[in-house]
Amino acid sequence: MQLRRRWRAGKAGESQRAPSCHQVGPSLRKGPGHDVGSCHQRGTAVCPGGSCSTCPLAPGHGELAVALAGNPNVGKSSLFNHLTGSRVTTANYAGKTVALSKGRSVAFGKVMTVIDTPGTYSLQGFSEDQIVARHGLTNPKPNVIVVVLDASNLRRNLQLYVEVADLGIPVVVALNLEDEARRLGRIVEPDRLASVLGVPVVVTNGQTGEGIRSLCEAVMQAAVSRPASPVRLSPEAERAIAEVADAVSQKLPSGVGGLGLRATARLLIEGDSETWSLLGDGLAERVRPVVERVKQNLREAGAWPLATERVRAIARLAVDVTRQMRRSGDWLLSLWRLSIDRTWGPLILLGVLGFTFWYMYSVGGILSETLGGLWGDIAMPHIAALGSLLFGSGVLSRVFVWTFGSGIEALLTVGIPYVFTFELLLSLLEDSGYLNAAAYLADSVMRPLGLNGRAIIPMISGTGCNVQAILGTRILASRRERLIASTLIALVPCSARIAVIMGSVGAVSGWAAAAALGVVLILIMGAVGILLNRILRGERQEIMMEMFPLRRPLLKAVLGRTWDKFSGFMREAVPYMLLGSMVVGFLYETETMYHLVRPLKPVVSGILGLPEVVGIALLFAALRKEIALQLSVALAAMVTGNPSATLSSLMDPNQIFIFALVSSLYIPCLATYSALSHELGKRQAFGISIVTIVLAVSVGFLTRVVLAVF
Amino acid sequence: MEQRFESQEEYLEQIYRIDPVGQVPFSQLVKALGVRGPSVSEMCRNLAAKGLVQYTPRVGVALTDEGRKQARQLIRRHRLAERLLTDLIGLPWERAHDEACKYEHIMSEEVEQLLADALPNTCPHGNPIDGTAPSAEPLSCLELGTPAEVVRIEREESKVLKYLAQLGLVPGASVKVMDRAPLNGPLLISVGDAAYALGRDVADRVMVRRDA
């Protein structure tokens, strides 16, 4: 049977939704994996090999490993989610995925392990995320690679295809973002693309999940097909690759690092340092003169660099694959142009920042007050009653009220109003693609910090949660930039810290004071960045970033992601909040608290001028930042003896300002600390923590002095 | 003596590269040359004695008119040598600079003139060899909306330029500058169907020719 026949490629006009048996949900919910197409019988429709014992589709042959590859922001993660029923975060900017994700999927009775890789333009490693992507595609070798192509930018996307086709693995092309291409007036003809490339092409839609079933079918078919045939470059380039391959094959007939011989040879010619190091000293010594010679020949023939040859090969291939249509006026495109305009862009950026602040202050504030009030009026009396019913009137009863009364109140006044509302807005911004424009505009502002504009993206997402943001610095090209960006991210107020600031300074002293605190934090970050840029050796990497037009955010996706983040926050925060309240209640009721705070007194009261007991809140807030607010409110109740006391009965507005500032700056929370330690190393994480403590105490003291003078 | 002469020229060249007209801080010169401070100050005194620089001890040096003239000539010879090495005998780009550093000191005026006639008028990095208009200009100099073709990407061995090639910024690609971000920020360029933000320093290394 001829396997690489011309493919009836994927239902260009497929309007039907995924089959009815397709359900989205956590993969555990459905036995061994997410069932994509079990309504089809394996064998008749799919397995052409029948009972062939070497067929990877045969029962007992293990799982089928399928890796997704593609340029950044082409929708790999969305497809992955549809395939596996996972909910990996997706958003409209490059660099959302920085690690490999694995999920399982059952298609036609066969279990597939699907691997999602970070987006990359090439198999050559430029930054950490690209290196991760390459390893996902080569080590271990998957059975099939699905190359996800952005139909609106086919030529550039095909460059990665050309590299992947060199790997000697069967390939399926998923033509994604076809709607986007149509919107821009570009129409790709999948049938032609399939015949030109010689591999199956399936039209998919990552947002709706259309085409997923056809994709699975194609993957099953490809698993028993021969590897994709490499795209032929110019004769000179081919000769060069063959010569180097020949030199390598004497020792290593299948290349290095799971790359296969052709890709190994090509990467050696292109000077990929990882491939060279895999070669080993002895062989490298012998191969180097060959590579030098063929490079010389390529230069003379005008066929250098090889990337140029790839572009030329694609130009030959892609001539009649795309049709250009006149595009109609599109308000999103106009809005995008405006958002990156040199005059309007910065104004819009300031507007977005201002709106975010206003939105947090007003919407978050109103929600916080309402929910807190309702809880205090309606539930608190019942909890007190329940406490005395269960434990009488002793210490235990009062600790019970602390735990469930004050603990849950803190969740209602912090978690829901601030964390949820903020994540919603952030998710909307991420999905629209606006962060990309912000990175472009912010580039010159980031220059003195030794960073380029791209670093603003993880920093903005750090306002949601620092942990994700620190992983997100993998998109930065050098370790130096990652170190600077991660340190700054540890100072970026995350949603929990924003809640602390809004709930304390904002609630007591009004929006202007909260804004002033924000400005102070930004100034501190600037100063730290400038300082690090001076101290650390190395240079700033200039910005080189693809710009993506704005897309209409999909409400369902935005809400889904907000919910994921919020429920994740609640899952982690609730036990801490309840436990924290219980511990404080216990310490207070047994009067052991004062012994605990005594060692901190010189710093807390002496330097910062805060009430001694606040030391408890600061101590516990190293676990989770929102505890700072929750505990200090609880402490206010404790000190005044009035259960509904507010923060202002414990501290005056100036003290509250200092308190919020210090708790925002000092030591990143436990989760952030472990993220820093994982990404940068233990020493760096420890160093950053020490720096933040010193910074918090000295800035706190300075603020105290300044506030005392004015 | 030869050695000494060479390094004297090296000093002139280095001062010229840092600042052709203004005063170059002493510390910056020491750092750029990678030589110990006392040797630098001794050499600066020598250069000042020959009227090539104005030297303020421990503060800095500035080229005199004569010094500037000599430095410019050295750089011209350096660039010609680079062209000769890469274009005619195919020395890899990354080695051309170091080799040319030797050639620039031994080139006679006659050879210099002959090379200038025989070779293209930019060095392999795209910098004009001397006074003449460049045949290709850096992308960063292109006016907004002017279509152009990438002629050459410099230092293609380096990591950065490899990344540019991945984005499709290779010789032959057609490119347009759509906008420049405020505050000397990146360029917004379009290549084929894609748009990119490109830092100005990188854009300096992408040499383009305007479409006729």
Image: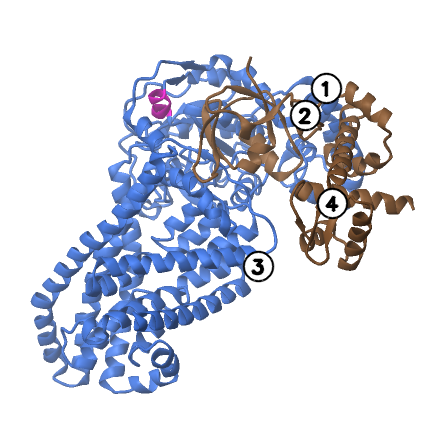
Chain colours: A blue, B brown
**Are there few (<14), some (14-19), or many (20+) residues within 10 Å of tag 3?**
few
Q: Position of residue A399 (x, y in %)?
A: 20, 79
* Chain under disc 4: A
If you read the primary sequence from the N terminus, does the residue marked by circle 4 or circle 1 appear first?
4
Q: Mark 4 to mark 2: distance in Å?
A: 26 Å
Which amino acid, mark 1? Ala
Which amino acid, mark 4? Gly
Q: Mark 4 to mark 3: distance in Å?
A: 36 Å
Mark 2: which secondary structure?
A: loop
- Mark carried by residue A535: 3
Task: Determine if the magenta segment contains residue A179.
Answer: yes
In screen coordinates, is A114 left or right of A167? left
Residue ID for mark 2: A304
Query: Which residue is depicted at the point 50% across and 61% down?
Result: A677
Q: Which residues are the magenta region? A: A178-184
Asked if both marks, 4 and 2, belong to the same chain, the answer given is yes
Query: Which residue is depicted at the point 45% across and 40% down?
Result: B183
Q: Mark 2 to mark 3: distance in Å?
A: 39 Å
* Chain under disc 1: A
Task: Determine if the magenta segment contains residue A475.
Answer: no
Mark 3: which secondary structure?
A: helix
- Mark carried by residue A280: 4
Residue ID for mark 1: A301
- Residue A574 in view of the camera: yes
Q: Mark 1 to mark 2: distance in Å?
A: 8 Å
Query: Which residue is depicted at the point 81% across and 55% down?
Result: B42
Mark 1: which secondary structure?
A: loop
